[in-house]
Every structure is written in C-alpha cells, then in structure tokens.
Image: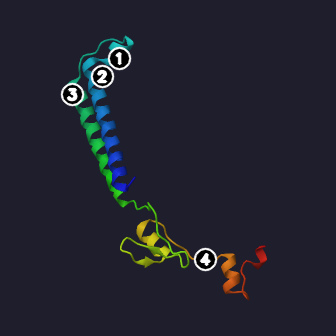
C-alpha cells in the first residue's frame, strides 16, 4: 500500500469518526436518547448547547485532519523492492543511477547514519590495529 493510499484511508477514517460523533451528538439532543434508552427524565431540546457542541466537534475534527495531513506529508518511508549490487551494495534509484546505500536511505527516509567499523572489517583492513581484540 503506498503513502497516498494510506493517507487517504487515515484522513477518511478521521472524517467518518468525527462525522459519526456529530450525528450522535444531534441524535442525542433531538431524540433525547437517555430518556428513550435508559428511562431518564425527558429533557427539552437545548438548541444553543447543541449548536455550540456541534461547532466544536467540527472545528476539532478539521484541525485534527489538518494536523494529520501535515504530519503525513512530512513522513518519508521506504517501500517496495530495492535493486542492490551484490558486490558494492549500491542501490539503483528510480532514474537508474547507482548510489551509495547511505545516500539513498538518507534521501528516502528520516534515518541518519553514523559510521563505524565492524570487527571483521577492522581485522581485514587494519590487522595491526584491531579495536575489538580485547573484547573477545
């Protein structure tokens, strides 16, 4: 599933949720649900309170959708298959260029890199200086 589809689903579910909340709020006021369902004392319709609550639900719903869309726009993530060289580990990008894996991941995600050296490479590249010698 791609990023745009996920964004549409998420925003759609938020809109449905706030819409349902809005409808329930008005059904409660118009039908007096506590009276109908639980035998509570009947209450008159309070138009001002219901209007204010409805407006607040709409404002909070729109604000939530706005923030969600803004945050989803900032999210970077990797998906699908990445063609990678079996020897040098470079990745072929969408334009067909072979780039270092660090650069590709940096450009297509929020990951940051800190370089180090693994024990095998340290022994191979620097046999006289093995920082992992004492940690065996």
Query: For mark 3, does the 10 Å Cα neighbourhood hold few (<14), some (14 to 19), or many (20 or more) residues?
Result: few
Residue picked out by circle 1: 34
User: Which badge, 4 or 2, is on the more N-terminal residue?
Assistant: 2
Disc 2 is placed on an element classified as: helix
Q: Position of residue 28 (x, y in %)?
A: 30, 22
Q: Nearer the viewer, residue 58 or 47?
A: 58
Q: CA distance from mark 3 to mark 2?
A: 14 Å
Residue picked out by circle 2: 28
Residue picked out by circle 3: 48
Q: CA distance from mark 4 to mark 2?
A: 62 Å
Is the C-beta separation of discs 2 and 1 under 8 Å?
A: yes
Q: Quadrant of the C terminus?
A: bottom right
User: Which badge, 3 or 2, is on the more N-terminal residue?
Assistant: 2
Q: Residue at x 47, y 73 (%)?
A: 91
Q: Nearer the viewer, mark 4 or mark 3?
A: 4
Residue picked out by circle 4: 116
| Left or right: 89 as drawn, with respect to 1 | right
Q: Position of residue 78 (x, y in %)?
A: 44, 62
User: Which badge, 3 or 1, is on the more N-terminal residue?
Assistant: 1
């Amino acid at each position: 599933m791609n990023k745009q589809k996920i964004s549409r689903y998420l925003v759609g579910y938020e809109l449905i949720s706030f819409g349902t909340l809005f409808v329930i709020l008005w059904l409660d006021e118009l039908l007096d649900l506590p009276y109908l369902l639980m035998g509570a004392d009947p209450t008159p319709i309070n138009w001002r309170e219901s209007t204010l609550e409805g407006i607040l639900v709409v404002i909070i719903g729109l604000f939530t959708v706005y923030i969600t869309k803004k945050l989803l726009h900032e999210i970077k993530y990797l998906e699908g298959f990445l063609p990678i060289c079996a020897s040098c580990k470079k990745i072929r990008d969408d334009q067909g260029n072979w780039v270092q894996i660090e650069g590709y991941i940096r450009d297509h995600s929020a990951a940051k890199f800190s370089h180090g050296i693994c024990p095998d490479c340290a022994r191979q590249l620097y046999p006289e200086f093995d920082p992992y010698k004492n940690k065996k």
